[in-house]
Image (cartoon, helix red, strand yellow):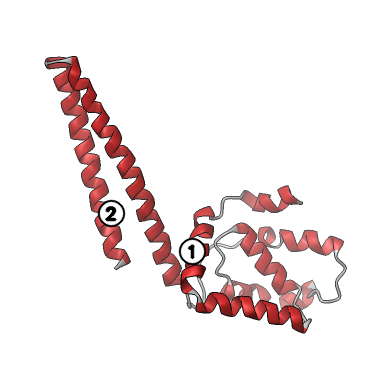
Amino acid sequence: DIEKSISRYDFLTKFLKGLAFIIAILSAVLTIQVSLLFLLGFLVPLVLIVTILIISAKCKKLRYLLQIRSDWGKNSIAKPRDFKTIRSLFDKISLLNNSDNTIDEQTWKDLNMDELYTRIDRTYTDPGESVLYSILREPLFNRVELAERAHVIRFFQSNREVREKIQLTLISLGHQFINNDIVNLIW
């Protein structure tokens, strides 16, 4: 369904690119050979280019949706992770926040928590990676806060349309901050 739409959009994009090229060449030749009025023929390729950009954006959105749906429910998603960068938010927060609930470095390593993080990480942005890491390093014990978190998790598990809409927004942001500069910028 989505893959067929992507194929159709790809074909349409290629066709429109070719058509725009042919019309542009034809307009140039006719302008030189016949009349300057054929210069207006260059407007058609411009309209086609705008159409191509719109179709390409829809195709990109469908590719993202396909990725989101294929990632959902997998045991782990293979992607490069730089834990030094990912943990930067946690490091900054822990300097200010002397919490008793923080998992210390040795315990984190003993429990192989980087591996657990890798298995559950489904984030699409650098800040998302950092927040997930911080959540794991500072577990909640307050029943009310745990219930609220569980409610949010259940909401997204049972509301595919809302979840995918938010994920589409996030995936389009992507990993655009080198060394998690957004955390440093905000901090």
* Mark 2: secondary structure: helix
User: Which residue does the image show at 15% across and 15% down from the upper left?
Assistant: 35
**Horizontal placement of 58 versus 92: left or right?**
left
Q: Is residue 87 above or below residue 114?
A: above
Amino acid type, mark 1? Lys
Report crowding for label 2: few under 14, some 14 to 19, many 20 or more residues within 10 A (C-alpha).
many
Residue 151 on image: x %, y %: 63, 79
Q: Which residue is mark 1?
A: 165
Residue 119 on image: x %, y %: 57, 75
Residue 43 on image: x %, y %: 26, 29
Q: Are marks 2 and 1 in contact (CB under 8 Å)?
A: no
Q: Which residue is mark 2?
A: 9
Q: Is residue 33 above or below residue 176?
A: above
User: Which residue does the image show at 72% across and 59% down from the upper left?
Assistant: 88
Q: Is residue 118 visible?
A: yes
Q: Is residue 111 visible?
A: no
